[in-house]
């Protein structure tokens, strides 16, 4: 005769860790950096692989912190070894266009000096160009979701706060 062990899920109602973790929902994550100039224009990069412009940043890889991803992406896209500053935006993005829901983090890259952009290196062909744009100018270059998020990020930088967004729109 066998007796149930205290770790048996049928007895305890507790799943083993691997089964519990496998059943958890997954979210995609992305991280970007908001760089601006003295006129409060934002730095946008022109990717080679899609029509819309972006801020420097990208997907957070497995086992990577969002701030580490932001740092890595700035290095890969611009050739700059600059750790990101404080967190400006946390944005919850609902599922859309076949993509699962996600979280987007925007970090402060600070105000760049006139000569900083001359040090950009587009090494791997991922980025074609970069430049500063007013918030109004970004509307025709970026996806609407990013345009809204950029407005929230600029406000957060001016106010010295971190803001929460949903679909790019500020909720706090």
Image: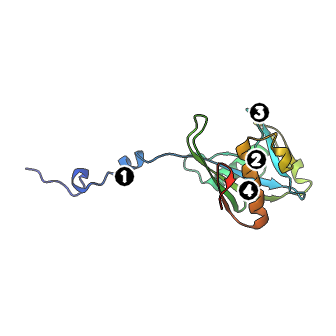
Say if 83 sits above or below 118 in the image.
below
Of tags 3 and 2, the one toward the viewer is 2
Say if 156 sits above or below 80 in the image.
below
Q: Name the residue under label 2.
A: 147
Residue in the picture at 50% in, 45% down: 26
Q: Is residue 83 among what the camera can see?
A: no
Where in the figure is residue 30, as x and y percent of width and height?
Answer: 64, 47
Quarter of the image that includes the C terminus: bottom right
Please report whichever mark, 1 or 3, sits nearer to the chain's N-terminal start: 1
Q: Is residue 27 among what the camera can see?
A: yes
Spatial distance from mark 4 to mark 1, Cα to Cα?
39 Å
Where in the figure is residue 77, as x and y percent of width and height?
Answer: 76, 43
Nearer the observer, 32 or 75:
32
Q: Mark 1 points at which residue?
A: 17
Q: Name the residue under label 4.
A: 152
Helix, strand or loop at label 4? It is helix
């Amino acid at each position: 005769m066998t007796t149930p062990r205290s770790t048996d899920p049928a007895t305890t109602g507790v799943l083993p860790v691997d089964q519990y973790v496998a059943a958890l929902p997954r979210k995609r994550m992305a991280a970007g950096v908001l760089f601006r100039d003295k006129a409060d224009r934002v730095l946008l990069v022109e990717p080679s692989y899609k029509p819309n412009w972006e801020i420097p940043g990208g997907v957070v890889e497995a086992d990577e912190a969002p701030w580490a991803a932001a740092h890595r992406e700035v290095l890969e896209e611009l050739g700059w070894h600059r750790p990101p500053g404080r967190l400006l935006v946390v944005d919850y993005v609902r599922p859309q266009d076949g993509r699962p829901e996600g979280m987007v983090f925007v970090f402060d890259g600070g105000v760049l000096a006139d000569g900083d952009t001359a040090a950009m290196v587009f090494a791997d062909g991922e980025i074609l160009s970069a430049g500063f744009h007013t918030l109004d100018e970004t509307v025709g270059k970026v996806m609407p979701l990013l345009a809204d998020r950029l407005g929230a990020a600029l406000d957060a930088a001016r106010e010295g706060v971190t803001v929460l967004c949903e679909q790019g729109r500020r909720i706090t």
